[in-house]
Every structure is written in structure tokens, then in C-alpha cells.
């Protein structure tokens, strides 16, 4: 399961050229699929805590943490107004050291990163 999450994350994040991300705000990405909106959000001085709910389902919370930043990449598909339940969103969340100015991870090195992928229908 972990390898599947990593592969999907690489696919989502690896399909674009390298971008510099301003760590002070939310950015919309220009090379997003035509049927939705993509955003990158940087949560400064935050870290990820992975938890399980009462039903054993995985979720995360962010909390104050010096020296860490959380990057949240979100794709939200435009909902079809004809259908009440047509909402769809994908989210990749990962934690990085705040001292990093750039990061290039692939293959096995991705396993050293605290990263989550979520699909919300």
C-alpha cells in the first residue's frame, strides 16, 4: 500500500517541470487538468501526525513544529451541477525540513519522507 501511495504521488508531482514554490502563500498551478483546479499550500512551522479513527481509518493532523513545513498539493475536479455527489478531490501531503530550499526525491528515497495521498469522492 505504501509503495502504491508513493507511486501515485510521484506520478502526480513528477508530471510537471521543476517549479520554484514561494513558501509564503498558496499557489495555483498552471498545468492542471482542464476539468479542475490545482493548488499548492505551504504550512510553515507545522508537522504531520498520522492517526487512526475509531473505525481504523487513517487520517492526519498538523501541529506546531519548529524546523518543519508541510506541503499540501490539492487537485479539485470541477463538480457537475447535474449530480449532487459529483465532487472529487485528490490530496498529496508531505513534510519537509524548513531549512530546505529545494528537494529532489525519487524511488527508494521517497520512503524517507512522511507523505500521504488521499482521494475524496
Image (cartoon, grey):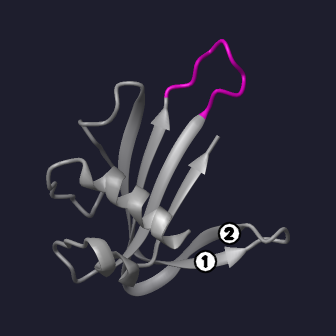
Residue at 34% in and 31% down: 33
SS at mark 2 in the image: strand
Q: Which residues are magenta?
A: 78-87
User: How many marks overall?
Assistant: 2
* C-alpha distance separating marks 2 and 1: 7 Å
Say whether residue 19 is magenta: no
Can the viewer see residue 24?
yes
Quadrant position of residue 18: bottom left
Majority secondary structure of magenta residues = loop
Task: Tell me if mark 2 has few (under 14), some (14-19) or many (20+) residues whose alpha carbon lies within 10 angstroms of its own.
Answer: few
Q: Is residue 35 above or below residue 62?
A: above
Residue at 24% in and 36% down: 30
Q: Is residue 4 above or below residue 35?
A: below
* Foreground residue among 99 and 56: 56
Can the viewer see residue 97?
no
- Image disc number at residue 50: 1
Give the image location of residue 109, x and y in percent: 29, 80
Confirm or deny contact between disc 2 and disc 1 (CB under 8 A). yes
Residue, disc 2: 58
Give the image location of residue 48, x and y in percent: 51, 77
Say whether residue 82 is magenta: yes
Quadrant position of residue 29: top left
Amino acid at each position: 500500500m505504501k509503495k502504491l501511495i508513493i507511486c501515485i504521488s510521484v506520478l502526480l508531482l513528477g508530471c510537471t517541470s521543476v517549479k520554484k514554490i514561494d513558501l509564503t502563500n498558496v499557489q495555483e498551478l498552471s498545468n492542471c487538468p482542464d476539468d479542475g483546479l490545482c493548488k499548492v499550500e505551504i504550512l510553515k512551522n507545522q508537522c504531520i501526525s498520522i492517526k487512526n479513527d475509531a473505525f481504523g481509518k487513517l487520517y492526519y493532523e498538523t501541529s506546531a513544529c519548529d524546523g518543519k513545513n508541510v506541503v499540501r498539493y490539492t487537485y479539485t475536479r470541477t463538480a457537475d451541477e447535474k449530480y449532487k455527489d459529483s465532487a472529487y478531490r485528490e490530496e498529496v501531503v508531505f513534510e519537509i525540513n524548513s531549512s530546505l530550499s529545494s528537494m529532489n526525491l525519487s524511488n527508494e528515497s521517497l520512503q524517507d519522507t512522511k507523505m500521504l495521498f488521499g482521494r475524496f469522492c
